[in-house]
Each structure stands twice: as C-alpha cells, then as structure tokens.
Image (spheres, rainbow, N blue to C red):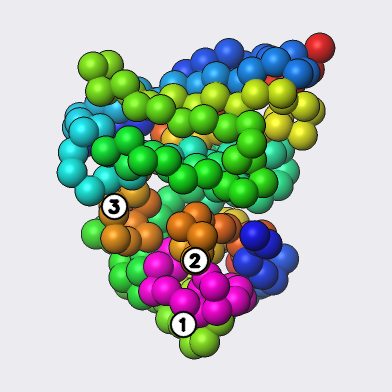
Amino acid sequence: QLQLQESGPGLVKPSETLSLTCTVSGGSISTNNYYWGWIRQPPGKGLEWIGNIYYSGSTYYSPSLKSRVSISLDTSKNHFSLKLNSVTAADTAVYYCARRLGGSSNCDYWGQGALVTVSS
Amino acid sequence: QSALTQPASVSGSPGQSITISCTGTSSDVGGYNYVSWYQQHPDTAPKLIIYDVSNRPSGVSNRFSGSKSGNTASLTISGLQAEDEADYYCNSYTSSSTWVFGGGTKLAVL
C-alpha cells in the first residue's frame, strides 16, 4: 500500500523559505507515468493546486505561485520536496502531497497534510 | 487562472439525491475529460471519489456519479447518508498544463 508523509518545519518566519518533504513508501517515485504534487489549504478555506513534478523531472506550477515555488525529486531517498520562498501570512496553510496518474485526473494517494504557519 | 465555480452549500435529507455543479471554461472543464471530485471530512485529507469525469475508484460507493456537459461538470450523490456530510471539491486540468480546483461545496445532510 502506497503511503505519502509530509515533513518539515511547522513555523516559518515572514520573507523566509518554506521547505517541505514528502516521503513515499510502498512504491517508487521513479515509476513510469506518475506525477507527484503539492496542494495546500489555508485554514477554513478551499484547496489550491501548487504544482506537480513528473517522474522524469518535468515541473508544472500554478501561475500565481510560479515565481516563488520549486518542486524537486530525490530518487535516492524516494522523496520529493517543495520550496516556497518569500513567504507571508497568506501562505499559512495545510500542505498536502499527492500522487497523480499521468494522462488522467486520478489523484489517488494523498499524505495526511502538514500545517505550516508563517509568523514572526 | 480562476477557481472553478461551485455552490457554497447544498443540503438534502437522508435517502434523497443531490447534485453539485462545477463550472469552468472551454480552457479547463469544457476542453478536457480530466475532471475529478474529492470528498473531505473535517481535519482529514481529501479523498478521490470521481476521476476523468465519471469514473469511480475501487471502493467508492456507486451512489456517487459524475458527468459533464459543456463547461459544467456535476457530481450526483444518490441515497444520501449522514456520512456523506462533508466538503466536496472539483478539480480540472487546464490548457496551460496546470490544474485548478473549485471553491468547494459544503454538503449538509438534514
């Protein structure tokens, strides 16, 4: 059974960089035809797509976050990472990692989510 | 890209059917059969209930069904049960090779 687990600091200061890692167990992130992505949800609000990375390394980002976001794969550790720089209080959210099948909207496995608060 | 438009809330009685709409444009919902729906209970991760407009993942009740007409996708829940009370989100692929969510719909089972 595939499992995804987010990890990283729960508190980040304004203007600094938010960094999260999603560790995948029960399967390989190098598996053909899968995308690995990040979605966030501010407290009491809806879901927002942040971006995806293909197993080959190609990346796709939300236009509203593109200038501040980076997603990378580490196949040796079987995890992928999110970096969001120049954060503000508006970036406070629960951050989810998830897997999506290529050529489909099938986003079947999600992590449990990690709350990141931006505050001084 | 703008969020897809969903009603903020819907409600129904046990046993009834309800439908949640998700309206986009020809650049997202209307242009691709890559629409999915997620159910989210409080303080839990979203759960996939419909993908590619009308497909149900293994283990999801057949009371959930999806469809699309033009730029609007719809999720129908039949035989409403108390456990269906949750937030529901649609998600679509876009012509920019990105993905966009709807604003979410809170379902109340009265």
Q: Which amino acid does label 1 sit on?
A: Lys
Q: Position of residue B40 (x, y in %)?
A: 53, 51
- Disc count in the image? 3
Q: At label 3, which amino acid type do we have?
A: Leu
Which is more foreground, mark 2 or mark 3? Answer: 2
Q: Mark 1 points at which residue?
A: B68
- Magenta stretch containing residue A48, yes or no? no
Quick check: can you spot residue B67?
A: yes
Residue at screen point 31% across, 21% down: A74
Q: Residue furthest bottom?
A: B69
- Mark 2 Cα shell of 10 Å, populated few (<14), some (14-19), many (≥20): few
**Dot in front, 3 or 1:** 3
Residue at point 71%, 30% (across, down): A92
Q: What stretch is highlighted in magenta?
A: B15-39
The image quadrant where one finds the C terminus of chain B is bottom right
Crowding at dot 3, Cα within 10 Å, few <14 / some 14-19 / many 20+, comes out as some
Res B45 visible: no
Which residue is denoted by mark 3 in the rendering?
A101
Mark 3 chain:
A
Q: Would you place residue B50 above or below residue A91 in this image?
A: below
